[in-house]
Image (cartoon, rainbow, N blue to C red):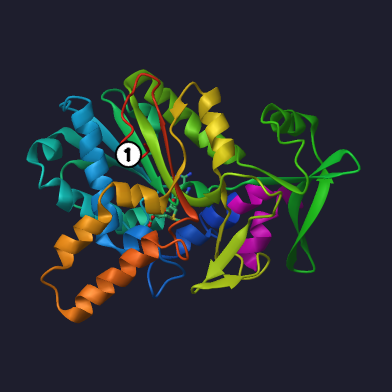
Amino acid sequence: MKKINKIFKKNKSLSLDLYLEKILYDKDAGYYQNFNPFGAKGDFVTAPNISNIFCEMITIWLVSFWESLKKPKNLNFVELGPGNGDLCIILLKTLKNFPEAFRSIKIILYEKSKKLREIQEKRIVEKNVSWINDLKKIKKGPTVFFGNEFLDALPIKQFKKINGEFFERYATLKKKEVKFIYKKAKNKEIIKLKNYKLTKNNGIIEYPEYGFKELNTMCNRIKELNGGLLFIDYGFNVNQGQDTLQSVMKHKYNKIEKNIGKADITSLVNFDLYKKYFNYQGLKVENVISQSKFLQKMGIIERFNIASKNLSFDDRSNMYLRLKRLIDPKFMGENFKVMFAKNKKCKFSLAFK
Ligand SMILES: C[S@@+](CC[C@H](N)C(=O)[O-])C[C@H]1O[C@@H](n2cnc3c(N)ncnc32)[C@H](O)[C@@H]1O
């Protein structure tokens, strides 16, 4: 409770995004600063934790991108929020099968959580991997920014319209419990919503201000250096006006107000909104496709057939169930979507056509 009190010390109430930022990343109270949430013993699993062949497909996509640019000597692959490092480890292993690409692709990891960065530094010891805090420092070479479940982890704002007036959601502390309240929205916030034509929506309006700020530097890098941003995340294309915040702890849903700082909180990604954002930024966006389509276009089933050929029945079944989890529409196949925003000159569209 002491840590939560500290969050509200300066301000009695915090806008939802500022509150989320603090309970997820505050150096004392922040969930990601204190826990390693990945895997069976943690709170959730992600695609790289589920299956190595997911990571292999990302590597093949990256190598193809590098080839499409005529194999430049220097290409940056920036992983946004690498979590426990699983993707990066398999990416490096797979990349070694393509020695020229391995020599030419520099891996840069961008991680906000001190705890996770320590875990990554322990697990990843290759020379061509470095960590960066300031993306403006990327000065040369075409660049691919990649984020798996990165966008959903960024704090969002929420608004609602009552009798034609807009209200913003805030968090406050009442009798030692976090409560959510709505306050009249500031004009400058309403203007932002209008710019994205969100004010016509009924129900809850979600606005990823933090996300847009984070992505601004990346978009500038892409326009200057060439390349693109590849995102995989759970979300939707058509806004339903819903409150999409969700909290999980020990693989079960948790009430947003409970276990603060001990449970993860994310929101669904509004891909349509991000598409508009990238277009405003002067990038070109491929059609948003399902994870199932992306992975199958990249050859995940063929890869499964080869990789599982000589396995025992039990190991093959295990590998199959993991594949199913990634591509079956009943599991992650359709809920998870893939988005590729790129420099306008870039013709590469592997898996998206
Ligand atoms: C849900 S986890 C996904 C981890 C990993 N990509 C995976 O798929 O297993 C979100 C990751 O993004 C990181 N993160 C969130 N916001 C960030 C930010 N603004 N800058 C850098 N990393 C961030 C978190 O610390 C965490 O590593």
Horizontal side of 335 relative to 123 (left or right) equals: right
Identify the residue position indicated by label 1 in the image. Answer: 78
**So how many labels did they put on this image?**
1
Q: Quadrant of the N terminus?
A: bottom right
Can see residue 245?
yes
Residue 315 x, y percent position in the rendering: 20, 76
Q: Quadrant of the C terminus?
A: top left
What is the magenta range?
1-20
Residue closest to the eye, 117 or 210: 210
Residue 280 x, y percent position in the rendering: 55, 23
| Residue at the (58%, 53%) spot, across then down | 267
Residue closest to the eye, 96 or 352: 352
Residue 6 x, y percent position in the rendering: 65, 58
Residue 221 x, y percent position in the rendering: 39, 25
- Would residue 96 be counted in the magenta stretch? no
Can see residue 262?
no
Position of residue 237 relative to residue 44, above or below, is: above
Horizontal side of 154 relative to 301 (left or right) equals: right
SS under mark 1: strand
